[in-house]
Image (cartoon, helix red, strand yellow):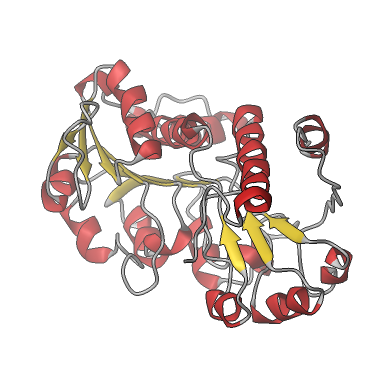
Amino acid sequence: MERPLFEKLNKYDFDLNLVSERLTIDNVDKAEGSDAVLISGFDDCDGEIIKKLHEFGINYVYTRVVGVDNIDFTAIDGYGMQVANAPGYSPRAVAELAFILGMTLFRHVSPATYNTHMANFALLPSYFANEIHNATIGIVGAGTLGTAEAKLYGALGAKVLAYQRHPDPENKAVEFTDMDTLLKESDIVSMHIPYIPGKTGNFIGKEEIDKMKDGAILVNTARGPVVDNQAVSYAVRNFKLGGYGTDVLLDEDKIMGKQFDSLDDLPNDIDKDLMLNYPNVIVTPHMGFYTEKAVEDMINISFENFDSMLKTGKPTHLVNK
C-alpha cells in the first residue's frame, strides 16, 4: 500500500530503493549503496544493524514515525550518525482508533458481537451501558494526538479531563487536572504519552488501576510498556476494569507484522495472558497510523527531512543533537 505513495510523493526526485520487508540483520545488506535509510517503527535498528549501516557509509538513519525507541542511540552517537523523525502527521489517525476502541468497549460491542457470533442473542445485563454525553473521559498526555481524541469525545458532549506534565493554557478542548483526579473520575482513560525508559514504564500499573472506577475502560495507543499489561489482565479478569483496548504490546518487534498459529506461540507470556481475556480486551496490530492521510504525511515529512539535510546539513526534525 505504501510503495505507490512513495513514488507519487517523491517531489525531490530521490533515488528510491523500496524494500517491502522490515529491516533486520538478515536483510540489512539491501541498504548497501544508499546514502541514507528511512525506517518504520517496526524495523530493527539495534547496535548490530547500526554497525552494518556505518560500514556501508550510511550516516543518516531517519524514521517516518514519531517514536524512536527501536533505535540504539548509543551506537548511533558512537558512529556520529544522524537521526530524524516525522512528528506532526495526521493526529486524527491514532486519535480515531483510540476513540473507536474506547467506544467499542464502553458500549460493550465487543462481547455482544462475540456472543451473537456464537449464536447467543440474549440481552445480557452486562450490556447495560451509560451514554457518552453523561461520561467523563481522561486523556493522559494532551499533546497533538491526545487533544485530537479529546475533541472527538467533546463533540459528543462528554466531559474531558487531561493530565499533562506541562499543561497548555491555550488548550480549550480539555480540563486539566491531576492524575489522581483523572483516574478516579474517568469512565474511559486513554494513553497518549511516550515511552521513556526509567520514567514512563508502567505509568499505569496496579496502584493506578485501583484508583479507577470499577468497570472503567483503559485504552493504550501510545507504547506497550507505558501500561503494566499483567496488572491490566488481572484487573479485567477480576472485573475491576470493564475492558482494555490497545494498539500496542510488549516486545512488538517479535510480534507485530507476524502470523502465529495460535496465541500459545506468542513470545511474551504477559501479552498472551492479557489477550486470553478477549472479548473484553481488544488488541489491534499497531495500525493507528495506518490511514492514507497519515501515511502521506509521514512520507512527505520524511522527504522534507532529507531535502533539508542536503541543503543545510540538518533535517527539519533532528532527534539527536
Foreground: 227 or 215? 227
- Residue 168 quadrant: top left
Compared to residue 55, the image places residue 142 above or below, namely: above
What residue sits 67% from the left and 45% below the top? 307
* x and y, in percent, of residue 139 in the image: 28, 41
Foreground: 151 or 68? 68
* x and y, in percent, of residue 284 in the image: 57, 45
* x and y, in percent, of residue 28 in the image: 82, 70
Q: Which residue appears farthest toward the front when viewing the image?
A: 312
* Residue 276 shows in the view: no
What residue sits 55% from the left and 46% below the top? 86
- Residue 233 quadrant: bottom left
What residue sits 44% from the left and 34% below the top? 95
* Residue 185 shows in the view: yes
Q: Is residue 319 left or right of residue 299?
A: left
Foreground: 246 or 61? 61
State how many labels appear. Answer: 0
Q: Is residue 309 left or right of residue 219?
A: right
Foreground: 190 or 129? 190
* x and y, in percent, of residue 193 in the image: 36, 52
Q: Is residue 25 left or right of residue 268?
A: right
Q: In the rendered image, which quarter contains the N terminus?
A: top right
Q: Is residue 157 left or right of residue 301?
A: left
